[in-house]
Image (cartoon, rainbow, N blue to C red):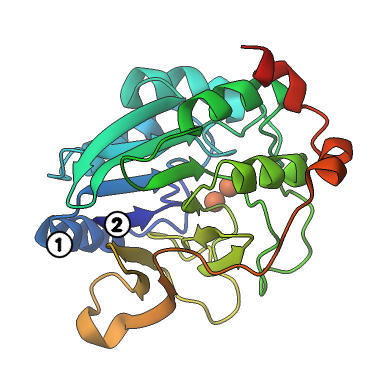
Amino acid sequence: MRIVQMSDVHVGSGLFRPDLLEATIQETNALKPDLVAVVGDLTMEGYRWEFEEAKGYLDRLECENVVYAMGNHDAKNVGYRHFEEFFGIREKSVEISVPEGIAKVVSLDSTKPDLDEGEVGREHYGWLDSEFRGWDQGPRILMIHHHILAVPGTGRDVNNLRDAGDVMAILRELKIDMVLSGHRHVPYVWSISGVRIVHSGTVSTMRVRGVMPPSYNVIEFDQDSVEITLQEPGKGAEGRQPLASFSRSPITTSKFYPDYNNFVVYDKLPFLKG
Ligand SMILES: [Fe+2]
Ligand SMILES: [Fe+2]
């Protein structure tokens, strides 16, 4: 399957660049992806007009499966109300027919109103488990705005996912193929315990860090391999470079012992009851 991953659109920012967003939409339509994952921070302050303007652009995406996640900026000023009005419910699970079968895509709201840091929260663990456990029909993909693992080249990290350890243990156990995230405005990929954590940069702003330009990711996922490419909007082949490449089945030498895991994954019991 082909995924276009973009995030940190930030309509309303003085550093927003409509030309970059327009180029991205045009290029995405030409790529005909199976999924467009927009991983949060559509706006700057969560104001209604920002969502309205963002929707005006993003509605031009022709892909049948455009899935949105909420970002911390979208949750400012009670912006989650507008998010729901314009982009639908904040958390959802969709199943998409792809050449490899049926992909399960779960979008999770990791925001807390008016805070920059995120949290999945124990109340979500059971839902995550019930969506992904035993899913063997195709790729298992989670969308979440905040970063589970620190992203290099982003300066001091004070707004990560507060329950990152617990979430990571759950993702490992559920054998999630890929996590799509944004938030740090730097594209980067980690692969850990069989889970690929893929960050997109900011797609349409100059809220960049260091020399990293605005960009989005194109992910090619097939039976044998996963290829992740960074693309600068409007730059064609010149603005394209590989970010990471994996074999489809993760190679991991890690082994986790159930007895030890019982100490670590202490929230396991509530979702085993159901
Ligand atoms: Fe952002
Ligand atoms: Fe963010």
What x and y, as percent, mark residue 192? 63, 63
- Between residue 273 and residue 236, name the one nearer to us: 273
What x and y, as percent, mark residue 195? 56, 56
| Quarter of the figure with the N terminus | bottom left
Q: How many residues crowd mark 2 within 10 Å: few (<14), some (14–19), many (20+)?
A: many
Residue behind mark 1? 31
Question: In the image, what residue occupies the spot 71% across and 35% down?
Answer: 115
Question: In the image, what residue occupies the spot 70% across and 45% down?
Answer: 169
Single out the residue that lies furthest toward the top: 274
Single out the residue that lies furthest toward the bottom: 238
Q: What is the number of the mark on residue 221?
A: none
Cα separation, mark 2 vs mark 1, equals 8 Å
Q: How many residues crowd mark 1 within 10 Å: few (<14), some (14–19), many (20+)?
A: some
Residue behind mark 2? 4
Amino acid type assigned to the residue bearing label 2 in the image: Val
- Between residue 55 and residue 220, name the one nearer to us: 220
Whether residue 93 sits left or right of residue 23 in the image: it is: right
Contact, mark 2 vs mark 1 (Cβ under 8 Å) = yes
Indicate whether 264 appears above or below 83. below
What x and y, as percent, mark residue 256? 75, 53
- SS class of the residue under badge 1? helix
Answer with mark 2 or mark 1, whichever residue precedes in sequence. Answer: 2
Amino acid type assigned to the residue bearing label 1 in the image: Leu
- Between residue 64 and residue 205, name the one nearer to us: 64
Question: In the image, what residue occupies the spot 77% across and 46% down?
Answer: 165
What x and y, as percent, mark residue 219? 33, 64
